[in-house]
Image (cartoon, helix red, strand yellow):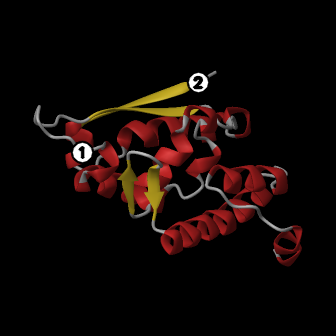
Amino acid sequence: MTITIALNTDNINNLDLSPVATVIEKLLQEGAIASQEQQLRFEINYILEQDDPRELSEIPEVRLWFIRLDTRIPWLPFLLDWKAGEFVRYAAMLVPHSFSIKEGIQYNPEALEIFLMHKLFVLTDWLQQQAIPSKSRLQSMAQLLGYELDDALFEML
């Protein structure tokens, strides 16, 4: 069952994480985190001027909100609906990038690598705490960003 969290301009401008916190707290209380894997989507209704051509990930206020969210719930990518592009959009909120008409989003390579490794370490620990197998999940997550993770890396972890 897909969970959609609506965010508006006020939530973002006030760094108000309550729409997410309410959902996450309920899932934690119900012990339902594992059953909601890749089910979370964000509906972002951020008001822009009509002639503002920026994507949401180019708006500093929106990015700041996602940075705050990531510090509070660093394992959130587990819940994001990867098939709907939520993980890639989440990464765009946190990783410096540019847009190319021909090639789409172009992440800063070093920043993307740091982001991926950070998420890999956070999720490895969190998934182990939840008794959820992690290797294939993390390999799939890395593939979404264009990386292949070697089995030797998992042996070190």
Identify the residue under disc 2.
2
Q: How many discs appear?
A: 2
Residue 69 visible, this angle: no
Query: Please, what secondary structure does the residue beneath circle 1 have?
Result: loop
Q: Position of residue 122 (x, y in %)?
A: 64, 65
Q: Are marks 2 and 1 in contact (CB under 8 Å)?
A: no
Horizontal relation, residue 152 to residue 125: left or right: right
- From the top left corner, tell me how far across and down residue 139 is, in percent: 77, 55
> In this rendering, is residue 23 above or below 128?
above
Instruction: Give the residue drawn at x 74%, y 49%.
Output: 140
Where's residue 39, x and y in %? 61, 31
**Who's the residue at 24% across and 36% down the image?**
46
Q: Secondary structure at mark 2?
A: loop
- Residue on which disc 1 sits: 54
**Extreme residue toward the bottom, this view:** 156
Looking at the rendered image, the disc whose residue lies closer to the viewer, 2 or 1, is 1
> What's the residue type where badge 2 is placed?
Thr
Is residue 66 placed above or below 118 in the rendered structure? above
- Assess disc 1: are there few (<14), some (14-19) or many (≥20) residues with their C-alpha within 10 Å of its C-alpha: few
Give the distance between the C-alpha atoms of the residues marked 2 and 1, in whole angstroms. Answer: 28 Å
